[in-house]
Image (tube, helix red, strand yellow):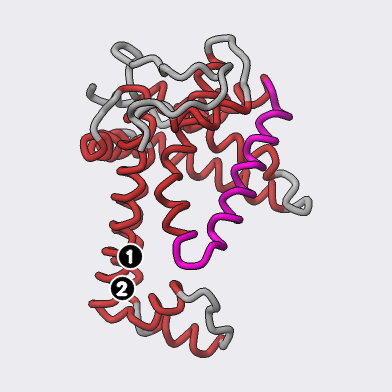
């Protein structure tokens, strides 16, 4: 399951392929992502448990969105029930991925505190961050190395998590191995990822200009283009077919927590 090495220009092709997937059923994509955003915001506002719960379930929800992309690619319909696909197959491994990411985030913040970024981390983790601009500037000025360390470690974590939920869901790969494959895929295709990231950043600026309305398109595009990049980097042979039937009501499978 060695990830393929692709040309840098392929990063632009992922945007185009993702847009084509989005345009197959744009209204339903907007509805699905709106539901996800509202649910995530509501859950994160639960005291103490909210934000960790969102982190744990993020890979599960992502798997459902990827199942929707797969259905569209195969000429089938995108349905609301696709959101629950991750709760029907490899659920425990997907939640484990979320747990690894959550623990890793706390470890990275702890490492930043140990190298002089305690004030900065305290501000970042506060539910009501201090509005004093002088204090903010002092915390940033005194935590240069901590910021650099955090950027490097969080970037590596992001790379390791990019394709990991998809590999777990479609391939049945163990969580840690999926993260290793995802990191290798990202590093092997650094040029394509750079083109993809810079293009997406430019589109994000454009999407933010008309009262943020462009994000109604760009947010779904983030997921459809992610699916396109996964399809290009990892060969299709040997994939498991999702066992969940989206036409049925949600019924927890044997792999559900």
Q: SS for tag 2?
A: helix
Residue denoted by label 1: 150
Q: Which mark is residue 146?
A: 2
Marks 1/2: CA–CA distance:
6 Å
The residue that appears at 34% across and 76% down in the rendered structure is 144
Task: Tell me, yes or no, whether the two marked residues, 1 and 2, touch with CB atoms within 8 Å.
Answer: yes
The residue that appears at 29% across and 77% down in the rendered structure is 113
Q: Can residue 136 be seen in this view?
A: yes
Q: What stretch is highlighted in magenta?
A: 25-50
The quarter of the image holding the N terminus is top left
User: Which quadrant of the structure image shows residue 169?
Assistant: top left
Residue 152 in the image: x percent, y percent?
31, 59
Residue 187 in the image: x percent, y percent?
28, 39
The residue that appears at 58% across and 84% down in the rendered structure is 131
Residue 143 in the image: x percent, y percent?
34, 79
The residue that appears at 40% across and 22% down in the rendered structure is 232
Q: SS for tag 1?
A: helix
Residue 104 in the image: x percent, y percent?
29, 57
Q: Which of 69 and 254 is in front in this view?
A: 254
The secondary structure that most of the magenta stretch takes on is helix
Image position of 220 with respect to 135: above or below: above
Asked if residue 41 is among those painted magenta in the image, a careful observer would answer yes
The quarter of the image holding the C terminus is top left
**Mark 2 crowdedness (10 Å alpha carbons): few <14, some 14-19, many ≥20:** many
User: Which quadrant of the structure image shows residue 167?
Assistant: top left
Image position of 41 with respect to 192: above or below: below
Asked if residue 46 is among those painted magenta in the image, a careful observer would answer yes
Image position of 66 with respect to 77: above or below: below
Residue positioned most to the right: 210
Q: Which of 153 and 52 is in front in this view?
A: 52
């Amino acid at each position: 399951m060695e990830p393929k090495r692709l040309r840098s220009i392929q990063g632009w092709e992922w945007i185009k392929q993702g847009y084509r997937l989005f345009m197959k059923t744009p209204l339903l994509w907007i509805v699905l992502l709106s539901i996800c955003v509202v649910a995530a915001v509501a859950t994160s506002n639960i005291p103490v448990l909210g934000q960790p719960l969102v982190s744990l379930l993020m890979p599960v929800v992502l798997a459902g969105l990827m199942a929707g992309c797969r259905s569209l690619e195969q000429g089938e319909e995108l349905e609301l029930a696709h959101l629950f696909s991750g709760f029907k197959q490899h659920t425990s491994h997907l939640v484990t991925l979320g747990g690894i990411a959550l623990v890793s985030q706390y470890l990275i913040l702890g490492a930043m505190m140990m190298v002089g970024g305690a004030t900065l981390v305290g501000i970042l983790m506060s539910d009501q961050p201090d509005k004093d601009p002088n204090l903010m500037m002092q915390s940033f000025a005194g935590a240069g190395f901590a910021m650099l360390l955090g950027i490097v470690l969080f970037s590596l974590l992001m790379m390791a998590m990019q394709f990991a939920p998809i590999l777990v869901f479609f391939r049945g790969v163990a969580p840690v191995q999926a993260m290793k494959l995802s990191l290798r895929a990202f590093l092997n295709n650094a040029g394509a990822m750079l083109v993809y990231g810079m293009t997406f950043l430019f589109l994000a600026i454009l999407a933010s200009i008309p009262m943020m309305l462009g994000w109604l398109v760009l947010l779904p595009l983030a997921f459809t283009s992610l699916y396109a990049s996964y399809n290009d980097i990892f060969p299709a042979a040997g994939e498991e077919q999702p066992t969940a039937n989206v036409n049925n009501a949600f019924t927890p499978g044997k792999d559900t927590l």
